[in-house]
């Protein structure tokens, strides 16, 4: 890392950092959504931008190719030396592995490397609420944004939720509040990122194919607290031991949330209500019965979002109104339709076993489960244990379908399907009135789809293609 350049920018944020970037040569590595947004932001700020992607030109998105018309020098099919020639800063997209050979050489040469999240935060001037965890990030982030829209300050919901923070860093007002979903991949490449509220929802093994060990994965998540001060707030899950252990990693004031037990300081359930107890004052927020979202894990998400929103001083009545009206996020246990007594749900965001377990626990009905994809090195034995007694049949797809089948064994009747459309047809044939057909893959999507959103869209299209009068 180039210490001189880091020291030069350490105290710069907002207008001062934007001025520092003017005329600088910056390389952007990776041209998915985050990379494209970073390129556009840098060009708007007057930087010379060199961008590269491992994909061939034919596989790049229209948005990526359009960068050339905006003055970006584009390299495709790899990361040649010309993509970094003269670079004074490198911005790495979240999907780019940190051990990429070209990045290792740049580090040795002393070129500063940051991620798109860090870049956007440095350009912004608004305060940030950052939310991470293995599961529930997107729902909690979206709900926190919905809660905060009940007050007068501008609110931006962005980050790993699908809208790169860089896309709005120049236009979002300094007096606003940013609610950012942040991933371990994004946190790996932060330096000075400083959220006023930092929330960790839960921690279970995930992305081991990227991080290598659980310990390194947790370390990446814990970077969310690295720059917090005593004036900041950390929101932590008191029911999850690995998450609770992070309390010592922040200098901020900890606000706990718990679904299972009363707390001396935090947000919890009591007598069928969500309640808060802060500085000795107990206040009822919302009856649990008014929450639309299914599942105990979504109750935890509501508790966490409430804890995040309380930092702004918002009152109980608007919190209750927003919680009652919130209908969830696409691809997260999303109801698609009921057909001939069978309910179809899209949980394509279930990209690890722990997430799919929570989805299964949300249903008392027998489940026809569609699962499989790229397993990211995880153990599916816990999923098999949770599926017993809940899953009547599994339809398995994707790269790691055989690994899941071995874990399911004879306890859960399972069948392979070559495509999502065929999996949906097989699930419909197997379902009986009163069943739930649930897409919750427990795997990443990239072996068969562009991303989890594409996977969920294909599932929904296949489900909605059935006519009401179709016979099995």
Image: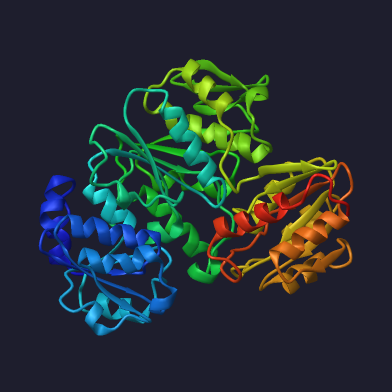
Q: Residue at x 42, y 23 (%)?
A: 150
Q: Is residue 17 left or right of residue 280?
A: left
Percent from the top left, x then y, of residue 183? 45, 55
Position of 374 relative to 349 (above/below): below
Looking at the figure, which quarter contains the N terminus?
A: bottom left
Residue 90 shows in this picture: no
Query: Based on the displayed image, in which of its 4 quarters is residue 298 positioned?
Result: top right
Q: Position of residue 283 (x, y in %)?
A: 52, 16
> Residue 24, image x and y in percent?
13, 65
Tell me the quarter of the image containing the C terminus: bottom right
Q: Looking at this rendering, what residue extends furthest in the bottom direction?
A: 81
Residue appearing at x 28%, y 51% in the figure: 120
Horizontally, residue 211 falls left or right of residue 174, namely: right
Colouring rule applied to residues: rainbow
Give the residue at x 36% y 26%.
312
Dividing the picture into quadrants, the one containing residue 323 is top right
In the depicted view, which residue is nearer to us: 83 or 3?
A: 83
Is residue 34 in sight in this rendering?
Answer: yes
Q: In the displayed structure, does residue 254 sit left or right of residue 257?
A: left
Figure check: 12 above or below 107: above
Q: Is residue 188 above or below residue 55?
A: above
Residue in the image at 39% along x and 28% along y: 311
Q: Quadrant of residue 449?
A: bottom right
Left or right: 462 with respect to 224? right
Q: Which residue is nearer to you in this view: 436 or 93?
A: 436
Measured as percent of width and height from the top left, residue 290 is found at 64, 23
Q: Is residue 452 placed above or below 61 in the rendered structure? A: above
């Amino acid at each position: 890392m180039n210490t001189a350049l880091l020291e030069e920018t350490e105290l710069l944020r907002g207008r001062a950092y934007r001025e520092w970037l003017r005329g600088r040569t910056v390389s952007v590595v990776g041209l998915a959504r985050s990379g494209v947004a970073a390129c556009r932001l840098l060009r708007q700020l007057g930087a010379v931008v060199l961008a590269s992607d491992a994909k061939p030109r034919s596989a790049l998105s229209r948005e990526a190719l359009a960068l050339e018309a905006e003055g970006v020098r584009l390299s495709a099919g790899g990361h040649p030396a010309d993509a970094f020639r003269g670079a004074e800063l490198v911005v790495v997209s979240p999907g780019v592995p940190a051990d990429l050979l070209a990045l290792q050489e740049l580090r040795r040469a002393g070129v500063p490397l940051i991620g798109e999240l860090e870049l956007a935060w440095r350009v912004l001037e608004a305060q940030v609420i950052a939310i991470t965890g293995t599961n529930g990030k997107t729902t909690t982030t979206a709900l926190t944004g919905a809660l905060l829209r009940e007050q007068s300050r501008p609110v931006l919901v962005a980050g790993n939720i699908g809208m790169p923070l860089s896309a709005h860093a120049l236009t979002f007002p300094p007096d606003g509040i940013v609610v950012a979903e942040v991933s371990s991949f994004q946190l790996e490449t932060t330096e000075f990122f400083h959220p006023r509220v930092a929330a960790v929802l839960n921690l279970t093994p995930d992305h081991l194919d990227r991080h290598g060990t659980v310990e390194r994965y947790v370390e990446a998540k814990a970077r969310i607290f690295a720059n917090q001060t005593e004036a900041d707030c950390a929101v932590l899950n008191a029911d999850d031991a690995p998450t609770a252990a992070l309390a010592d990693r922040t200098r901020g004031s900890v606000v706990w949330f718990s679904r299972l037990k009363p707390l001396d300081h935090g947000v919890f359930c009591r007598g069928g209500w969500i309640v808060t107890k802060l500085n000795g004052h107990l206040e009822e927020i919302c009856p649990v019965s008014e929450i639309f979202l299914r599942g105990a894990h979504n109750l935890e998400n509501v508790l966490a979002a409430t804890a995040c929103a309380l930092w702004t001083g918002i009152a109980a009545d608007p919190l209750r109104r927003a919680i009652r009206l919130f209908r969830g996020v696409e691809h997260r246990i999303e109801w698609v339709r009921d057909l001939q007594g069978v309910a179809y749900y899209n949980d394509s965001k279930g990209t690890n076993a722990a997430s799919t377990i929570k989805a299964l626990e949300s249903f008392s009905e027998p489940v026809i489960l569609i699962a499989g994809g790229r397993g990211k090195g995880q153990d599916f034995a816990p999923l098999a244990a949770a599926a017993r007694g809940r899953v009547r049949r599994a339809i398995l797809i994707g790269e790691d379908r055989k690994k899941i089948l071995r874990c399911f064994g004879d306890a859960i009747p399972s069948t392979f399907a070559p495509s999502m459309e065929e999996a949906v047809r097989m699930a419909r044939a197997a379902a009986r009135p009163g069943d739930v057909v649930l897409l919750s893959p427990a795997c990443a999507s990239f072996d068969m789809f562009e991303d989890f959103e594409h996977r969920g869209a294909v599932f929904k299209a296949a489900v909605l293609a059935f006519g009401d009068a179709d016979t099995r």
